[in-house]
Amino acid sequence: MKKILFVSLIVLLAAATGVAMAAKGFPKRNITAVVVWGAGGGTDTCNRIIHAEMAKVLGVNINVINKTGGVAGSVGMSHAYSQKHDGYTLCGLSESNVTAGVQGGWDKKFDVWDTFIVGGSPDVISVTPDTPYQNLTDLIEAAKKNPNSIKAAASGAGSIHHLNLLAVEKGSGADFNFIPYKGSAPSQYAAITGEVSVVVTSLAEQQQLLRGGKLRALGMLIPESFDVEGLGNIPSSFDAYPSLSEYLPISQAIGFAVPADAPAEAKAVLVDAFNQAMATEKVKTWAKENYYLLSGKSGAESKAVFDALESNFAWTLWELGAATVEPSKLGIPKP
């Protein structure tokens, strides 16, 4: 009899434990966030900030690791996507990853991910201090008067900074001599050393160079002006050229993603934790101090942003001859 009672007690305890675990639902263990860019960069920092706050809500750790390499972050994306689609592996990424497919590093359309957008730093168009351009109008009119004579850097062909430069040209009628570089840092270095006269990168990336007098900001590539500590107000380029509104803004979209076919329960929990984390003073203070505009989009809103970015980036690369796979073969519509 005692043996039967003992066995029955074990069964009841096991059942109770099972019920408790089932009641907790997702997550029951730590989560891993695979960031596709290097440690210390914008995407890495964004992920570490948001996941630290999300972990407090979820009650488990979110361990951030970096897996770089490949084409447009394809190594990290492939690794994250190859794990079980159970919500326990996230992928830290940015708008630049939408070009992996047309560059041959990824064989899927980007909507295999459900994305979460923390935000991004707006782009600014700047010049070297020794140039004669005191404001955006001076620069644009000079570029219109002598087409293709003013050298401008904006990271690599097809990058968000290059697309912003193209938008400035379309919206103002200017014609710059675009010189591609391998990233924002090299393009900014080219500007401060005089290889180019104009550079378009994000305010977060330029801020120290602007404060140090190495660059002079002429205009934000968003509808609003921007107050920068130690520099004052940087006007919106839209003020001088309202027609830019037809092509801008094209904003960074830094955040993370989970496979779209992950369990609905897990995704719902992640959305709730994300929303709570975005509302914290920690995230708001970090964004303000680093000149990031917060987004907080997820679900259909975030998908619409990434769909538009993928279409714009992919077809621009294809038309520039910088893509190896035609976007239509991946089901990417023209913008």
Image (cartoon, grey):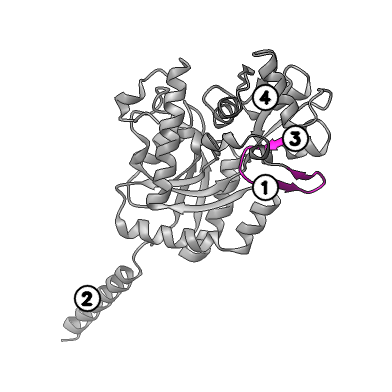
* Residue that badge 3 annotates: 217
- Measuring 43% from the left and 52% from the top, which residue is drawn there? 298
Measure the alpha-carbon separation of dots 4 and 3.
Answer: 15 Å
Choose mark 2 or mark 1, whichever is in front: 1
Residue 181 shown left or right of residue 263 in the figure: right
Residue type pointed to by label 1: Tyr
SS at mark 2 in the image: helix
* Residue that badge 4 annotates: 187
Q: In which quarter of the image is the N terminus?
A: bottom left
Measure the alpha-carbon separation of dots 1 and 4.
Answer: 20 Å
* Mark closest to the chain's N terminus, 2 or 1: 2
Segment tinted magenta in the rendering = 218-234
SS at mark 4 in the image: helix
The vertical placement of 10 against 146, above or below, is: below
* Residue that badge 2 annotates: 11
Please tell me in which quadrant of the rendered image residue 269 appears.
bottom left
Residue type pointed to by label 4: Ser
Asked if the stretch drawn in magenta spans residue 231, the answer is yes
SS at mark 1 in the image: loop
* Residue that badge 1 annotates: 291
> Mark 4 packing: few (<14 Cα in 10 Å), some, or many (20+)?
many
